[in-house]
Amino acid sequence: MLPGCTPWPPEYAARYRAAGHWTGQTLHGMLRARAVAHPDRVAVVSGDRRWTYAELDARAIWLAAAWHRRGLRAGDRVVVQLPNTAEFLEVIFALFRLGALPVYALPSHRHSEITHFCTATGAVGYVTTGRHAGFDHRLLAAHAVQHCPRLRHVVIAGTGDDAAPGGAPGAGPGSAPEELPFGAVSLDALRAEGREAGAAALAEVPEPDPADIAFLQLSGGSTGLPKFIPRTHDDYLYSVRASAEICGLGPDTVLMCVLPMAHNFPMSSPGFLGALHAGGRVVLAPRATPAEAFALIAAERVTITSLVPPLALLWLDAAEAARAQGAPDALPDLGSLRVLQVGGAKFSEQAARRVRPVLGCDLQQVFGMAEGLVNYTRLDDPEEVRCTTQGRPISPDDEVRVVDDEDRDVPDGTPGHLLTRGPYTIRGYYSPDGAADAHNAAAFTPDGYYRTGDVVRRTPDGYLVVEGRAKDQINRGGEKIAAEEVENHLLAHPDVHDAAVVAMPDDYLGERTCAFVVPRAPRDQAPSGIALKAFLRGRGLADYKIPDRVEITEAFPRTHVGKVSKRELRQALRAQLLARA
Ligand code: J2J
């Protein structure tokens, strides 16, 4: 196994194999099997492009061949930062074929995050795009090349104009020849190189070991910098296969990806991997607005999609508003949609109850985490269970404990900390040269349970209800923000003496971020909120991590052991918001 990763103890690995959970297939092996079984079926729809299974597999092989010729090897890490376009699939399956590891970055990440991903994982490659959502990612590539000396393979998928149909900048036929600085190569050129070399170039390259790490996923985190989650082919494919079954996927499935593909939820719960596993079709939505998403659902006859709660609310409101207009074309035909999955943050019961009447499909709540454990309400659960719980675990071998502050089990119905271990939950974060050892000692129990940081209540029939959170994190509409990461950036400001970042309630996003700041200088000379936000942007922090609100204060309330009392800060904030409302 990749050095720096914690394997399952051998007796557990043996058990998971004996139970048929771990089947010894790689992620690329899965695609290959489908491409052999039904080569001509459409695998992915991305703008006006439709790739069959055979085409997706062929493209992945070409890229793998080109990368291999250029020296990329099994175990190498490659940061992948691509929007929802077909190239995302092509790139990750090429890396899976080689046994090189994608490190999944979000399109919204900026140079602070990208540099950290590259250096902390020792990445030798970085794949990004041209212009996307008004931002030129080549700037990030240039910055990464300058600050990460190990980077040798920088690849740009397309050049610009993210308004182009298909959302794949410049990737279509007839795109202009590309001038790429800093030794980068375009994905198109790389693919062409591999195509010329042919699949034979990979003849001597073995498929990776299915028990080894397939990729590094980002942790939502609660401490300084994001941690990396190492997932094996075996464990991930189990969660994908079992999810596809729970969600009723089959060859007729048309699964639309609206959330960023790098997130664990749209990737594997059951996500695009689940749809490919089932031999279905993946439709990539470049944007999540109701107008665009509804039109795509109608045009492609989408059967299932997954959203975070704020997007689900937006869709519900838009559908209701369109119906209220009464015009026959105001709302596209959503009749093909069978299941709307909602997860990533708590979905209120009130909103949950609107899904069937407004969108005409079943709601499935999903409570998962990139570290492993995923819970689903089942499609045949009573309405009550689907609207009031966050589901139950995928696997009979998921071990779930709900405990008090001293790690003692609490009875069903009592809120407590959720601990879990099982056939697809990691035993440790990626810790090259011991970098995450201290964090691992805190985040896992000695007997291998992952401390999720979530506070849940278990119902007598084994369903989980999320009650809150014990980790120092803000869940901003499904995007996770580690308070300490933002605090550390604020502390780098010369005029900031101390900083504490907390969640504040928000009707739409569930939570937003508020930064309390103690300035060095007297209050009237303190930096403004606007200046502090600009400072954070300048440090290359992703936009979703920039605090929504900044409060300048003279001192922080303290707990009896002298720590900043975030609970009191949250209470004060709530009182302040109420007073202003
Ligand atoms: C409340 N909190 C939730 C829910 C996740 C499927 C679905 C989601 C994720 C995900 C995922 C929640 N209600 N329904 O990886 O495969 C919060 C919890 C959890 C954290 C994990 C998947 N669903 N959460 O959101 O790694 O706090 O994964 O521990 O991004 O999101 O975040 P993440």
Image (spheres, grey):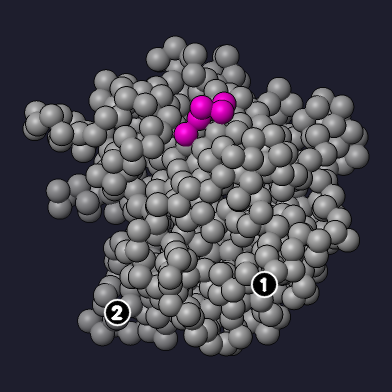
Residue positioned 53% across, 64% down in the render: 81
- Determine if the C-beta at disc 1 is less than 8 A from ligand 1: no
- Determine if the C-beta at disc 2 is less than 8 A from ligand 1: no
Q: Secondary structure at mark 1?
A: helix
In front here: 267 or 482? 267
To which quarter of the image does residue 25 belong? top right
Name which residue type carries label 1.
Glu
In front here: 255 or 383? 255
To which quarter of the image does residue 39 belong? top right
In front here: 331 or 381? 331
- Pointer 2 local density, CA inside 10 Å: few below 14, some 14–19, many at least 20: few
| Residue 112 pos. (x, y %) | 51, 74
Q: Secondary structure at mark 2?
A: helix
Q: Is residue 164 above or below residue 314?
A: below
- Say which of marks 2 and 1 sits in front: 1
Q: Quadrant of the N terminus?
A: bottom right
Q: Which residue is label 1 attached to?
A: 193
Q: Which residue is label 2 attached to?
A: 531
| Residue 182 pos. (x, y %) | 57, 87
Name which residue type carries label 2.
Ala
Q: Is residue 492 visible?
A: no
Q: Is residue 151 visible?
A: yes
Q: Earlier in the sequence, mark 2 or mark 1?
A: 1
